[in-house]
Structures are given as C-alpha cells and as structure tokens.
Image (spheres, rainbow, N blue to C red):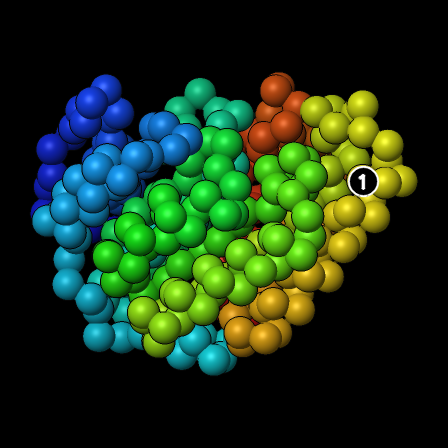
Amino acid sequence: MIEQTRKCPGSLMIFRDPYHATYVPRSGMQQWAPARPALPLIYLLLLMLIVAACSPGQPANQGTAGSAHPAKVSGQLTYVAIGASDTFGFGTRDPYGENWATDLANDLSVNANVHLVNLGIPGMHLHQALSVELPVALDVHPNLVTIWLAVNDLADKVPLASYSHDLNVLLSRLQAGMPHVRIAIANVPDLTLLPHFSTFDPVVLRQQIHDYNVAIAATVNRHHVILVDVSSHNYDLAQHPEYISPDGLHPSVVGYVQLADIFYQALQG
C-alpha cells in the first residue's frame, strides 16, 4: 500500500529554481524532483530545509548495508534515487510520473508505504552529485538508496580513476552517515545500441563500457552493496528497441518499467 506523507507545497520557486512535491495520480507517492542540473549552495540549503520539513522520521525496519540480500521492509520506506536525466524521467511525456524510480517505488509499495525522494538531475555527473545530491540524501535518512550515475561520466570522458574514486567517496559517506541503509548501484548498459551514440567508435565504446562496469563491480564488492546489472543480459536493447525513447538516448515508458523490474529483482535477490 502507498500512502502520502505530510503534504508539502505543490511547487516552490527558489530564485526561479522550482522543486516540486509531485503526487503521482496512479499511486499517490510523494516525490521530490529537482528541475535544474546544478544548485548553488544557498539553493541546496533551502532544499534541504524543505525536504527535512516534509520528510517522515527514519523508519525502524532497515536492512544491513553489509548484505547483498537485504531484508524486506515493512511499514514506512523512505527511498532516495540518486541519478541524472534517466532517473529524472527524460524520454517520456510525464517525467515526474513516468520514470523507473517511480515505477520501482510502486513495486516496493506492496510491502511498505513508500516515500520517494527522486534526486535525478539532468546532466549530472558523479563528482557533482557529491555536493548536490548526496547532502540531500543524507538529510532525509532513507532506508533505501539507488544510484545510477555513469553514462554522463563515460560519454564526457571522465577518467575512470576519477570516477572510481568519486563512487568510493559516495558510498563511504552514505554508509558512514547511515550504517544500515540499503544501497543498490546500476552499471552501464550497451550504449552502442542507442542511436545517440551512433557516431562513437563501437569498439572503443564497448571497451569503455566494460572498463566502467568492472570498476563499478569492484566498488560494489568493496562496500558490500547491491549491483543492478543493466547489461544486455537483463536489459536487451537489441531485442527490445521499444525500450528506447524517440530521442535515441533515454528509456521509453516501457523501458523505464523494465528498468524498475531489474532494480526490483536485484533488491529481492
């Protein structure tokens, strides 16, 4: 069952930066969705105050960060999605309601009342997320955090060593601030099948994807968190081109549903 938590203002304008407490009609889940790719410190502080005022207390039933097979949560579940445009919901007509994080929260609502805090910001890189998304995630004390931040870094040629360092920092800070939080991290899908990457050398791109995924897997093992594998084995874009939106980069509505199912199965494993 999904319940709305304390209702917050429907839209807040902070120096022309709107943040919405969006209530999805089909589920009633409350979710915060940032509308800008980056925030000055004052914006972030104001957002944190708003989220703190509207968030429920930390639920008592939590899994263990050191387990790849977390216990199912009953009661109230606060879920934070750290990500970029594919977490925000680009590629659909209604990104606030049609994105994989919302679909996943809906799936999780079978066993808990879900409060979703969607921090997906278009254009976000992992290093930026350390100062923009991480503080908000820590402030709301979630039971569950998902992370999908790799494609922008890979496409913009962020050195793998820098990416790996930042991912380690992100996980270390999450686990230090919330020792019992469950964390799930998705890797990189086969970008060679996306029209957006048609101008990239496919051989070079496949090697970059492989290298990023090896680094992500190593970090997952080091921190004992959950790996969400969105490689072609689970997220087969070759056999399911309908998973790709017309923009040639982001998932479609059907693609987001499939991604949510992959995340859900990983959490239940």
Horizontal side of residue 16 vs 99, given as left or right:
left
Q: Quadrant of the N terminus?
A: bottom left
Q: Quadrant of the C terminus?
A: bottom right
Mark 1 secondary-structure assignment = helix
Q: How many marks?
A: 1
Q: Mark 1 belongs to which amino acid?
A: Leu
To which quarter of the image does residue 199 belong? top right
Image point (51%, 47%), residue name? 126
Closer to us: 113 or 20: 20
Compared with 193, 199 (above or below) is: above
Label 1: few (<14), some or many (≥20) within 10 Å?
A: some
Q: Please state the horizontal and vertical placement of residue 90, each as a whole percent of the image.
A: 49, 28
Image point (61%, 42%), residue name? 153
Compared with 214, 44 (above or below) is: above
Closer to us: 25 or 39: 39
Horizontal side of residue 231 vs 133, given as left or right:
right
- Which residue is most to the right? 203
Image point (17%, 40%), residue name? 46
Image point (81%, 29%), residue name? 200
Instruction: Identify residue for label 1.
Output: 205
Q: Please state the horizontal and vertical placement of residue 62, each as a whole percent of the image.
A: 32, 74
To which quarter of the image does residue 239 belong? top right
Q: Please state the horizontal and vertical placement of residue 102, each as a whole percent of the image.
A: 39, 43
Closer to us: 74 or 221: 221
Residue 28 visible in rendering: no
To which quarter of the image does residue 265 belong? bottom right
Horizontal side of residue 216 vs 110, given as left or right:
right
Residue 204 visible in rendering: yes
Q: Please state the horizontal and vertical placement of residue 71, each as a whole percent of the image.
A: 40, 76
